[in-house]
Image (tube, rainbow, N blue to C red):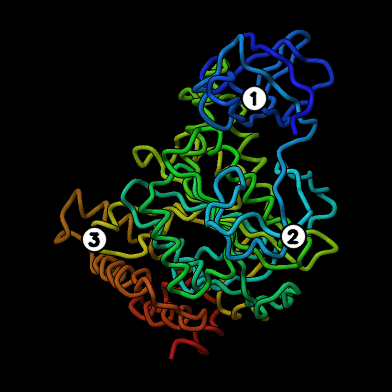
Amino acid sequence: MKGLQYKGLSRIEGPVVMTERSRNVGFNELVAVYGREGDGGQRRLGRVVDLDEKYTAVQLFGSNTGLSADESSVEFLGKPMELRVGPGLLGRVFNGLGEPTDGYGDIVSSDFLDVNGLPINPYARVYPRDFIQTGVSAIDGMNTLIRGQKLPIFSGNGLPHNQLAAQIVRQAKILGPHRTSPSGGGQEGDFVIVFCGMGIKYDVARYFLDDFESSGVLSNVVVFLSLADAPSLERLAAPKCALTAAEYLAFSRNMHVLVVMTDMTNYCEALREVSSIRGEVPSRKGYPGYLYSDLASLYERAGKIQGSTGSITQIPILTMPNDDISHPIPDLSGYITEGQIVLDREMTQKGIYPPVAGLPSLSRLMKDGIGEGMTREDHKDVSSQLFAAYSKVKQVRNLASIIGEEELSDSDRLYMKFGDIFEEQFLTQGEHENRSIEDTLDLGWRILKALPREDLLRINPKFIEKYML
């Protein structure tokens, strides 16, 4: 049954409609817009995005087809957009607005949560410390993922970021000393997955769904899909719905939640499109000036809080336009998140998978999740030495491109050989190869044998005697 409606619209501009009704209206309030009687008064949902003394701007979660300024009507629902949550979320597929698309109808629950979330008191946050083993040496050994961290993948068109994300989802498990068994189900150290696709093609969505099903994790996954043919506003709502589901599972059901969001570039493009329609003054490269705060409102919904044994770990994926890491999207994401995994096109062309660039990649929380009692006592030293040696490899390769490899010194040739071994054995591994942290560190020691002992300046001598046999 419809509530009180207000007849007529002042203006219709793409997905944004204007109405003169502005009293007792709240920002982000949910709105129902009805078309002319001729099309059956079709109901479209939207949200309030702007207010002043005379007008209210409403963004539609869909097309404006069939709307007429004179014959349409508006109903303010007096609440923000909400997501129905409950134990039945797991194993379900929803669209970007949180509506079921798998044919099983709504989940059985009377609980609803505001998709905009609630700000977390910084004092209530628990510092992330538990090591997550992804089974990928380039990440576990050198750019460690920590439970409660937000660690994006910076990629480019055509690079295997989807394969890497799917591999992490299949293999990730918590090994830190502070881990607890989730009360909502699953084994100790296991994750439940919230997957959010924004503006992705059908074949990409199908790839993830098939991978979840074949690996047996589909029953522990909640999927939100806003495909490339969906309206821009749905693309903007999808990550908010996904993170609301993650917050429910983590903080109400005490589960360990791994959130994979792809592609954040499509989300930002939708934000730019809607901002342009609203006539806002653009900032860098046409993106709105609030791009930073908008991204922060999503990324900062990761973490751990006091009073709950659950956690939210985020792996956002973004494709850098023209592989430009200084582009506003990766640039601003890097300021908000705690590091990044950067995929390199040149390494992909050399047949290296995963093509994780050694030097631009980093994990700012790595130091707090490794070492004795968490991974192994030699982890920090091995990682530091591999970084230093690979940095020298890059310098030598640049020098060789100028003067020729035959003019290099014996020491430089040794580092050239080390670089090839490091890429072929440490970085390269199969898409279904799951290495333990012990395997990764032992492999690191075997590769470091290619260097003279006097060059291993970043490793404690007692570890050299213990592990380099």
Q: Is residue 383 visible?
A: no
- Residue type, label 2: Lys
Quadrant of the drawing holding the N terminus = top right
Residue 22 or residue 432, whichever sits in front: 22
* Residue type indicated by callout 1: Val
Report crowding for label 1: few under 14, some 14 to 19, many 20 or more residues within 10 A (C-alpha).
many
Kindly identify which numbered label has been placed on residue 180: none
State the image coordinates of residue 327 (x, y, percent, origin top left).
Answer: 45, 35
Residue 304 — which label? 2
Would residue 431 be visible to someone looking at this image? yes
User: Callout 3: helix, strand or loop?
Assistant: loop
Dot label at residue 33: 1
Q: Nearer the viewer, mark 2 or mark 3?
A: 2
User: Alpha-carbon distance for marks 2 and 1?
Assistant: 39 Å
**Residue 181 appears left or right of 65:** right
Task: Tell me the SS state at disc 2.
Answer: strand
**Left or right position of 187 against 352:** right
Q: Residue at x 73, y 72 (%)?
A: 184
Residue 39 image offset from top left, x and y in percent: 53, 24
Q: Which mark is residue 350?
A: 3
- The first of marks 1 and 3 along the sequence is 1
Is mark 2 in CB contact (under 8 Å) with mark 3? no
Would you place residue 188 above or below residue 226 in this image? below
* Nearer mark to the viewer, of 2 and 1: 1
Q: Earlier in the sequence, mark 2 or mark 1?
A: 1
Q: Report crowding for label 3: few under 14, some 14 to 19, many 20 or more residues within 10 A (C-alpha).
A: few
Residue at x 63%, y 60% (from the top left corner): 313
SS category of the residue bearing label 1: strand
Task: Count all numbered tags in the image, as a single digit.
Answer: 3
Q: Name which residue type carries label 3.
A: Lys
Task: Name the residue located 23 percent from the left edge and 64 percent from the top edge.
Answer: 409
